[in-house]
Every structure is written in structure tokens, then in C-alpha cells.
Amino acid sequence: MTRTHQITDLLQAWSRGDPEGLEKLLPLVDRELQRIAHRLILDEKTGHPLRTNDLVNEALLSLLEDEPIDWKSRKQFYAIVAWRMRNILTDYARKRLSRGQDAEHVDIDEVLLPMKMAKEIVDLHEALISLARVDDRKAKVVELRYFGGFTLEEIASMLGVAPTTVDRDWRFARSWLKREITGVDE
């Protein structure tokens, strides 16, 4: 059995409530989840207070706390975990913004995640929600590329479309998001 099929089988076992499925799954997906989290944290441009392991753990905990998911594939799993990581970082940015409006002192978190960057993360998150209403696949391409760190070829495989389609979606989405966030056309 290939590693891909093994991961899918373990995801499905976990969906059925088999606790060993999750136990056996985590060592197989940990490296990829760490890579995704590392990429997301690096994209924050400054030292983020969340560590790679923390982001992975929070995303996995959010999966465990929610209703069980009927896992279809490892691609679906990685996409959902990347999406959850993005939401964790967005929630963190929102908290930074709300605390910053009321705070009178500057703490270490304010140095590590500047208010401007927190606003940019929230703006991107809200623009992605709007894009998903217009074209869900294009929003998924952005999530997988920007937040997941996947290549265009990997995304094409995950979404079951040609790499040229993903490239077109990526270019369109970047332009659309820029216009949505800044109000300026490229």
C-alpha cells in the first residue's frame, strides 16, 4: 500500500471513530503539516509568537473538537488543515487589533506582530471569503498556495484540474484580491 493510500485509509478509519487511526496517522502527516505551518509563520514577515508546532497542534485540536469529518483523501485533509491554520492566524490578528485599540502600553506581542500586519491578515481573510462566494476554486487555490505553501502542480493534483488552470486561477485571484483589498486595479 502506498503512503498516500495509507494516509487516506487512516483518515477514513479516524472518521469512523477508530482512535488508532488518528494515532497511526499523525506520524505520517506530521512532516507535511510542519512544512505548511512553517511556511505560514514565515509569511508573517516578522517573528510570530506562535511556533510551528503550536500552529499544527491548534489546527489539529480544532479538528478534534469539531464534528467528525468524512475524510475522502489526504488532499482534503491537508487543505482543511491549511485552512484551519489560516483561520488561527487570522483570529490571532483580530485579537491583536482589538487589544491594540484599547491598550495603553506596548507588550512583546505588539513588537512581534505589528498592528498594520494584523490588519492586512484580517483584510486578506475577509477578501478570501468574498472570493469564495464568487469562485470557490480560486479561493482554494489561494489558500493552498499562500497558506499551504503548495506548488501549482501540487494544487492541480489536489483539485483534479490542469496546472494551467491553477496558474490562471492563481493569477486571477491575486488580481481580484488586490482590487478587493486596496480598491486599485493592477
Image: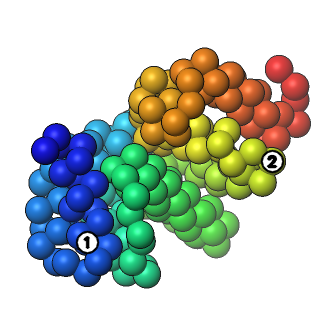
Q: Which of 170 and 55 is in front in this view?
A: 170
Image position, residue 2 (x, y; %): 16, 40
At label 2, which amino acid type do we have?
A: Val
For residue 125, side relative to residue 31 (left or right): right
**Quarter where residue 103 is shown:** bottom right
Q: Going 42% across and 71% down the picture, which residue do you hit?
A: 69
Tell me if I can see residue 108 in this picture: no
Q: Is residue 38 visible in the rendered structure shown here?
A: yes
Name which quarter of the figure residue 153 lies in: top left
At a point 52% along the width and 60% down the height, the residue shown is: 87
Q: Which of marks 2 and 1 is nearer the N terminus?
A: 1
The quadrant of the rendering that contains the C terminus is top right
Residue 121 drawn at (x, y percent):
60, 49
Q: In this view, does 100 lie to the left or right of 71?
A: right
Dividing the picture into quadrants, the one containing residue 56 is bottom left
* Cα–Cα span, label 2 and label 1: 33 Å
Is residue 71 placed above or below 148 in the rendered structure? below
Res 14 label = 1
Crowd rating for badge 2 (residues with CA inside 10 Å; few <14, some 14–19, many 20+): few
Residue 92, image x, y percentages: 50, 62
Residue at 75%, 45% in the rendered image: 135
**Residue beneath label 2, please?**
134
Observer-nearest of 30 and 112: 30
In the rendered image, the vertical position of residue 161 relative to residue 132, given as above or below: above
